[in-house]
Amino acid sequence: MMKRMLTGCLAGCSLLAAVPAAAAEPAPRYNTVELQAEAQREVPNDLLNASLYVELNDASPAALANAVNRRVNEALRVARDYKGVTARSGNNQTYPVYAKGNLLQGWRGRAEIRIESKDFEAAAGLIGTLQASMQLGNIGFTVSPEARRATENELIAEAIAAFKARAEIVKAALAGRSYKLQRLNLVNGYSGPPPRPAMARMAANVQEVAAPSLEAGVSLVTVAASGAIEVIE
C-alpha cells in the first residue's frame, strides 16, 4: 500500500512540476513606444470612368422596355468602333409613375452604360457622340490598378525608412543604446477626386455634341508604416 501511494505521488508531482514550465509568461517589456510614419506621392490619374443613361416614359411597359433597350444596344454598338474604350451595360430599371389619387399614369424606364478608358481623347469622342441620344451621368478619374501598385511598391521602402528615422529620434530622446522592432504594419491608402456629375441635361434630339474637355488631375497614394519598438537602455 505504501509503495503504491508513493508511486502515485511521484507521478502527480511530476505532472504538477511540468505545468509552470508550459505556462510560463513572456518576459515583460519596458520602454515600448508606438510609432507611425507614412510616405505619399501624387500620381497622375490615367484611367477614366464615365456613365451615360437614357430615361424614357411610356404608357406601355413593354413598349418602354423595347425603346430603352434599343437605345442602349445602339450605344454599345457605337462604342465598339472606339478602340481602347471599354463599354458595358449598367443599371437598368423600370418603375410606375402615378398621377394624383394614386392612379397609374404610365411607366418610366432608365438604363445606363459605363465606359472605361486610358485613352482620354477616344473616350471624350465617344461621350460626345453618345450625348446625342443619351444623358451624361458623371465622369471620374482614377489611378489604374497597375500604376497604383507600382507606386505603392516604391513607397513601401520610403515608409519603412521614415519609420526607422522616427525610431532613432525616440531612442535618442530616451537616452537608449539601441532599439528592437516589436512589430510593423503596412497600410495602403488612396485619395482621388470624386466623380463629377453632369451639370446639364442634353436634349434627346440633338444631332451633334462637342466632345467634352477632360482634365484628369492627380490622386494621392499613401503607404503608412505603424508598429512598436522597445528602447534598450
Image (tube, grey):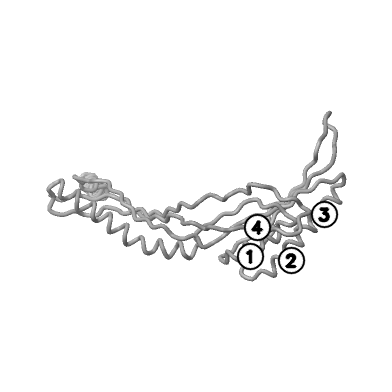
Disc 2 element: helix
**Is 32 in front, or is 104?**
104
Task: Write down the residue under mark 2.
Answer: 77
Marks 3 and 4, how far apart in space? 19 Å
Give the mark nearest the N terminus, 2 or 4. 2
Give the mark nearest the N terminus, 2 or 3. 3
Marks 4 and 1, how far apart in space? 8 Å
Marks 2 and 4, how far apart in space? 13 Å
Task: Write down the residue under mark 4.
Answer: 114
Left or right relative to 186: residue 176: left
Which of the labelled discs sits on residue 107, or is there none? Answer: none
> Is residue 16 at least partly visible in the picture?
no
- Amino acid on which disc 4 is placed: Arg
Position of 58 relative to 123 (above/below): above
Q: Which residue lies most toward the top here?
A: 101
Disc 4 element: strand
The residue under the point 27% across, 59% down is: 161
Task: Write down the residue under mark 1.
Answer: 86
- Amino acid on which disc 3 is placed: Ala
- Verify CB contact (< 8 Å) between mark 3 and mark 4: no
- Amino acid on which disc 2 is placed: Arg
Task: Write down the residue under mark 3.
Answer: 67
Q: Residues within 10 Å of mark 2 (few under 14, many from 20)?
A: few
Locate residue 210, reporting x and y percent.
Answer: 67, 59
Left or right relative to 233: residue 5: right
Locate residue 109, reporting x and y percent.
Answer: 77, 48
- Verify CB contact (< 8 Å) between mark 2 and mark 4: no
Marks 3 and 1, how far apart in space? 23 Å
